[in-house]
Image (cartoon, grey):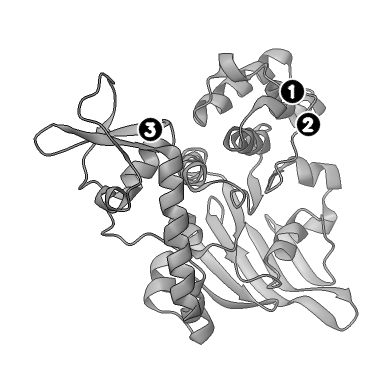
Amino acid sequence: MILFENVSKEYEKGKAVVSELDLEIKDGEFFVLIGPSGSGKTTTLKMINRLIPLTEGFIRINDKPISDYNLQELRWNIGYVLQQIALFPNMTVEENITVVPEMKKWSKAEMQQRVTELLASVGLDPDTYRNRKTAELSGGEQQRVGVVRALAANPDIILMDEPFSALDPISKSNLQRDVAKLQKKLNKTIVFVTHDMQEALALGDRICLMNKGKIEQIGTPDEIRSHPKNDFVRNFLQTGTIALKEDQTIQQVIAAGLFEPLEVTDEIGFYLVPEDTIDALIVALAEKEFVIIKGNEENVIGRITKQQLLTYLAQEISVEQESVVK
């Protein structure tokens, strides 16, 4: 359990970035900190592993003040995933993942086995990826390595600071799904910072919405959606997320002209129909460059590529942003 007791942080005297924060994060919980820029969410996250010292109050992990922990001991038990990834480009994937286990003097066999397990858990073939240099990987692959590196030494707590915000929608959706599965499987406590309300609602067991260094509301996704505490929460729910409507289907992508007509195809593989949801298309294109679309009579309509889907999503975001401005 992580407990904040009357925690405040000032970078300049009299100007609190976080004010009198009282907060409890439960063991095994996926806890999301969200808010606009300057709300104090990243500062709150970084105080947990003492990257930023608090000014007043106490933070306790398992009833022990973090100031009483040896700093190395504290950070070895807290994995950390950044938006910038911060992998070592001159090292292989395996060498990046085993940095902390090596410091903790794990045996070579233990480290190799851990790398195998973790790479497989996020859909990266261990034999293909373990000896590759991280500079050779795509952004999504690098972020997967960043996530499993944080898990390598089997810490109890994982801190994640906007880890997916720089990724395209397909990679982001796929990684969100992988991290959610990993958290349930490994029962880790995850504290996750985001500015994306849709991401918070999709991932969080509970969500803490912050504004100007204070907590506006804490609750489950259903509680936040159904019972926003005040106008700030209500407005952030509306403007802090750009999400696809539930009834949007692949037909909308076809209608936008973002597909390649085909009369027949020799391609063997995964098919979708126009009535399938765009969410299903996002999942399919997370692993493929294109998906074949069939009609009700099993005739091939055409194919939709990953780039065409990204173009469609970008158009949807622009329309949504214009409606928010109006």
The reply to whether residue 287 is in sight is yes
Q: Nearer the viewer, mark 2 or mark 3?
A: 3
Query: Relative to residue 294, is residue 94 drawn left or right?
Result: right
Residue 88: assigned label? 2
Q: Position of residue 155 (x, y in %)?
A: 66, 40
Residue 290: assigned label? 3
> Could you say whether the residue bearing mark 1 is in a helix, strand or loop?
helix
Against 229, is 267 above or below?
above
Mark 3 or mark 1, which has the lower sequence index?
A: 1
Against 285, is 325 above or below?
below
Q: Are marks 1 and 2 in contact (CB under 8 Å)?
A: yes
Against 185, is 49 above or below?
below
Q: Mark 1 points at which residue?
A: 95
Query: Relative to residue 172, is residue 268 drawn left or right?
Result: left
Callout 2 amino acid: Phe
Mark 1 or mark 2, which has the lower sequence index?
A: 2
Residue 181: assigned label? none
Q: Position of residue 215 (x, y in %)?
A: 61, 76
Q: How far apart are marks 2 and 3 (CA)?
A: 32 Å
Q: Distance between the residues labelled 3 and 1?
A: 33 Å
Total marks in image? 3
